[in-house]
Image: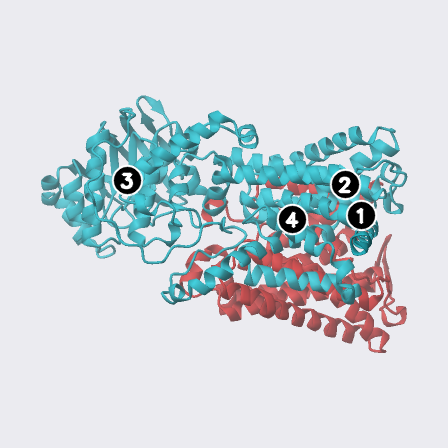
Chain colours: A cyan, B red
Amino acid sequence: MTATILMAFDLNSWYLTYEHLIANTVIYSIASLALYFSFRCGVFNLSTAGVMSLGAYGTGILIVKSGWPTPVALLAGTVIGTVGGALVALPVIRLRGHFLAIATLGFAAVIQELAGSFTGLTGGSAGLLGITGTVGMPALLILLAIAVYAAFALRRHRVGRAWDAIRVDESAAAAAGVPVMQLKLLAFVVSTVLAALAGGLFAVANLVLVPQLFGFGLLTNLLVYTLLGGIANPLGPVAGASIISTMPSWLTAAGAYLDVVTGVLLILVVTYAPGGLVQLAGSTTRLVRGAAGRLRRRAPAPPSLATAAPGNAAAPSAEVVVPKPSAPPRKLMDADVEEAHLKIVDLAKHYGGVKSVDGVSLEIRPGETVALIGPNGAGKTTLLNCVSGLVRRTSGSVVVNGQRIDGWSPQRIAAEGRIRRTFQTPRVLPGMSVMANVLIGLHAEIAGGLGSALLRLPAGRRSERDARARAMTALEVVGLADVAGAIASDLPYGLQRRVELARALVANPSILLLDEPVAGLSTEEADALKEILRDVVRTTGCSVVFVDHNMPFVVDMADRIVVLNFGRLLTSGTAAEIQAHPQVIEAYLGGADHGVVPA
Amino acid sequence: MQQVVNTIVTASVYAMFALGFNLVLGGLNILNLAQGALFALAAVVAYEVTHGGSSIWVGLVVAALAAAAVSLAINELTLAPLRRRGGAGFLPMVASLGASLIIVALLREHTGAQVLSLPSGALPQGIHKIGSVTISDTQLLAVGAAAVVYGVTALVLTRSSIGRAVRATEFDEDAARMIGLPTESLIRLMFLMSGLFAGVAGVVTAILYSTVSYSMGDEFLLAGFVVVVLGGFGSVPGTLLASVVLAAIQVGSVSAGLSDYSNALAFGLLIVMLMVRPTGFFGAPIAARP
């Protein structure tokens, strides 16, 4: 009895002592989630500290100089920070890699400096004083809960799935119809709103602002929170912030050397646990069980900032039984495939002086299966890349059913143009399940955006359910229904090809582009794939353009064979015509500099 | 004319600082955020050496070597283990941020967070007047140091097999890796050079402005960003030209009474450049890079 009262008393005084610390921890958690949303989509946006600064000063100045009530100022400050962050984002969001990091880091540095210069408004390094008002702990916790909820809701949603796909393989995502730029921008905006909000809350919770608060130090700390916790789970950044931002109170021994501890932690995390603590906890159990599996040297995709896997699904054993090429369903989909007439006119792609594709004209009739063959460097893959939009053509046009698609983005060609493709080396999305890989192919057809994800609207959920059913059908067609839950990158090579094929098939493409579909497959695997492809063509009537060096496969599959050499069309005809063609024999056997003889 | 002199002097410091930064970025695709910390480290070492009674020349050499040694240590202790574990993309940059945090924290404790100055007796004091233009010995030292740094770099890059390897790596990273580049020894050389150059730039800055502080490198990081974006990743002549442009903006904005906004102006230029020509003055077109 006494003990209970004593404890309650202690708790109360403990809370009073640490209230400020807890409030700031909640705020840092929100700011870390801002980084989480960017990183999750593979956008290395480092403007968070700068946006926080804008949000904080916006809120603070409106309270101090304009006398606005706290909630209104907080809202306005969040808007100011968001707009400021967006102004920097818009010109640079298209840039990749270090360009984006540099631009956003530079932004943070400039904001800090301007805050120091506009002394009339900000008080400069003497500080912005006189901020009044409070934001209660319940309000802070509710805001954090909303942010965490949003992160979880989006992770289960097609938006979160597409963000993951963009992070691990942007061009494969685009080729599957994912609107990359739109989704990156969405991630950036969500991230910026959270950062600006965190800034505003920081102003009210701390009452004094100096520019130095928002420098490299803050950014570094936020990175430590986010990366230490890991981005595999939205609770990661919150856990990271809770552990590290409270360190001054429980690691008093570090004293002035806290930054050294933080720096060492940061280095250790990125080197030895790039998935962060959450993933580390998850993989410890896996490590024990999977010790035998590790001996088989099936290295998982390097988990990094760019590829940190959504680590909830356990890795399956490396050896998946190769499914028997069971008789696939006679009809792939209920929907009828739209007939497509593909016309390539005088298409060229030059890299500097190298004419990879040099004026090729080609017509593919609806339902036709055409093989592209030719020596290495003949321009076969480049031709497929031009048609699917991954490579900008130098000149010429690509027309589908009378409509020019050659200026379109890859995702538009995939989604609207109904052209899907596979790659020479299978580009499954590493770390994502087989089912998720296939669902990415349906991204453009699933309903529901941000609002639908947050409110869990029934229409969006129904659409997702339907998509899963369709994806399952596609997996049955390629014989992978049994491994739908496995991590795609853990599957053997031959099955990865089928995952990729299912991702392309699931959207009922009118035209299927396959880049060496049977390369690296055993004879049995190749035969199985041939049966699958034939069945698809027969049941859906889609056109197929494929590149391959495996001549028996080419001869069996193709209605017509097109031979390319040095970027030009050499000839086209049936297998018998091609085999007897003197120039083809010359191209394959004659030139000393490209003596690749097809099997 | 005086403005021209000031521009050249400022440009010399930027050029030295940004060169190592840009070699690592262009050659190894690592945005090395520890470069600013090495810069400050060298200044603090020079402070200690000169206050110990040695001449500024000894201080310059010792400090530059110290920065080079720490730069190598960063590579060996953080980046090399990361590489062996397959960490790529942004992870090396984040690791370098961690290294920077450690170094700056140690410098802060060592200096007591005070702004220090080199002993004036140890510094060259001469001032030359040519017409209306004044040039001090310290300014000549800055320009001379930059000339040496660029001379050495040009020699290394054009006259040795190392240089060919660096240029091969910059031209086509994948192909270079396929033939075994960049090798660990090449990577070490890059970090050695970038540490050395950051160190020289730090000491020269300490001499020019006679101040030393643990955080003096932070301000140069932004300058480094602007220079690599304007000059193009990995481009040596681009780094030089961009340094002059940046210095001209800074000197110009100071004389126009806009010194508070000189960095904002420089950043605006960075954003515009990223929009119009993200490859910089001399960079290879993006399409030609893998």
For numbered disc 2, what is the local secondary structure? helix
Label 1 near label 2: C-beta < 8 Å?
yes
| Kind of residue at disc 4 | Val
| Kind of residue at disc 1 | Glu
**Disc number lying in front (1 or 4):** 1
Sequence-first tag of 1 and 3: 1
Q: Chain of mark 4?
A: A
Against A493, residue A260 (above or below) is: below
Distance from the alpha carbon under mark 3 to that under mark 4: 40 Å
Residue identifier under label 2: A137
Residue identifier under label 3: A476
Distance from the alpha carbon under mark 1 to that under mark 3: 56 Å
Q: Position of residue B170 (x, y in %)?
A: 50, 57
Q: In the displayed orientation, state which residue is furthest to the bottom.
A: B53
Residue identifier under label 4: A238
Sequence-first tag of 4 and 2: 2
